[in-house]
Image (cartoon, helix red, strand yellow):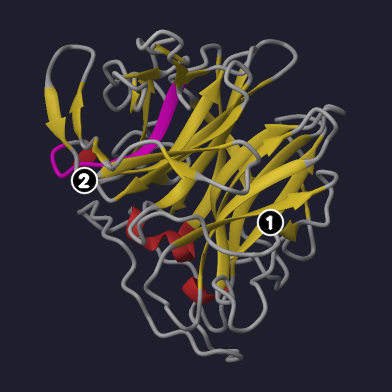
Amino acid sequence: MAGTCPSGKCVCDAGWAGDSCEFLNMGRSWRCGEAALCLPDDGSEMDAIATWGGNVVKDDDGSYHMFAAMMSHDCPLKDWLTNSVVVHATSSNMAGPFAPQDVALGPTASAGWDDLAQHNPTVARAPDGTYLLFYMGTTAANTTHVDCSNSTAGGGQPVPLVECVQGSAQNPPVCNQRVGLATSQSPTGPWARRAEPILLPGPAGEWDDLFTTNPTVHVFTNGSVLLVYKARSFASQGAMLTGTAFAEHWSGPYVRSSPSKPINTSLACEDASVYYSEAMHVFRLLLHCNCNYQSLWSLDGVHWNQTTSQVPWCNLTYTDGTTEQVQRRERPQWILDDSGKPVYLMNGVRSNASHKGYSWTLATPLFV
């Protein structure tokens, strides 16, 4: 469902290629600093070096606004659970490079469900013009931000799995992740955050009863929203699962799909990004599975089918023809043009050889 094959030869939808239109049709990526968002590696901007992923929205004046995760106090990606904030950056070009302007979402002065970290944002615009900033927030008792200003290594390994105890008030921040929503009438803010998450974990015993995180959305023309999210359960805390929820209006409530069950994909796959193809009348979903990607399609946004098996994508070819094997390429985000076609792909990446080992936001063009 990434193209049509009326006479045995497939005509692929924008951004897709292959005999059966099963592969992303990606061009050469831009190096750190040439596009997307890559902060100076000396911490001279925003008191930060590492960013992760990023999504873009266009303002009425034609400017482009990126919202990405940024690790405060010069910390590497591995400290995202204590130091991640949502940075706002701007550019006159959809692919960037983006210049950081301010922190859209950061720590709160008072205790709350998202006062510790704000991570993995995705931005959209409602039909009434409201800007919608979905994100993961978390908190934890007796946990504070880390100061990494004297650190010399980027690092950025995945957070080790810890045992989350059901009902415990002493769980670490990884156990307390929830999906939140902030809104504004301008991409420059101010942003109004909700006092409570918009999507709580499911009932005890369900596949998503531990936490909800990493939202991606499609906003319909009537203001309703399809939300795809990552979750884990207390019973299988190491399994990364992806599911869907729906709201009749972007303001909520957001209700888990019924019957609630995770999308059928590998337990190693996560960080979904969704868009709707007007040309093919299908939803498309892209996930990373360590150093591979997995694509799926759906007619209704609830029942999903795999387009192909996992495809490697950590061996980058840059615009100058050089190559680099990155250690992590995750958090994919579709960047759509005014017609809704995917024209760029943003990722969070980390390489031992680039940016002093700190993560940055990578931009890759899609052939349309």
Q: Name the residue carrying label 1.
A: 180
> What residue do we see at 40% from left, 85% from top?
163
Q: Considering depth in this image, is 337 or 131 the residue closer to the camera? A: 337
Which image quadrant for residue 358? top left
Q: Nearer the viewer, residue 263 or 321?
A: 263
Considering the numbered disc 1 on the image, is that residue within a helix, a strand or a loop?
Answer: strand
* Residues under numbered marks 2 and 1 in contact, where contact means CB atoms less than 8 Å apart: no
Residue depicted at x 77% and y 29%: 186
Quadrant of the frame with the C terminus: top left
Magenta part of the chain: 344-353
Q: Is residue 214 above or below residue 258?
A: above
Circle 2 sits on which residue?
357
In the image, what residue type sits under mark 1?
Answer: Gly
Q: Where is residue 72 in the image (x, y as percent from the top left)?
A: 46, 53
Q: Residue at x 50, y 90 (%)?
A: 165
| Magenta part, dominant SS | strand
Tell me if 279 is positioned left or right of 71 in this view.
right
- For the residues labelled 2 and 1, the Cα–Cα distance comes to 30 Å
How crowded pointer 1 is (Cα within 10 Å; few <14, some 14-19, many 20+) is rated as many
Residue 4: give x, y in percent of width and height.
47, 16
**Numbered label attached to residue 221:** none
Location of residue 282 in the rendering, given as x and y in whole percent from the top left corner? 59, 29
Magenta stretch encompasses residue 23? no
Q: What residue type is labelled 2?
A: Gly
Q: Residue at x 58, y 15 (%)?
A: 337
On the image, the x and y values in percent for residue 78 come to 33, 60
Query: Closer to the observer: label 2 or label 1?
Result: 1
Q: Is residue 61 above or below residue 349?
A: above
Q: How crowded is mark 2: few (under 14 residues within 10 Å), some or many (20 or more)?
A: many
Seen in the image, is 359 located left or right of residue 70? left
Front position in the image: 263 or 51: 263
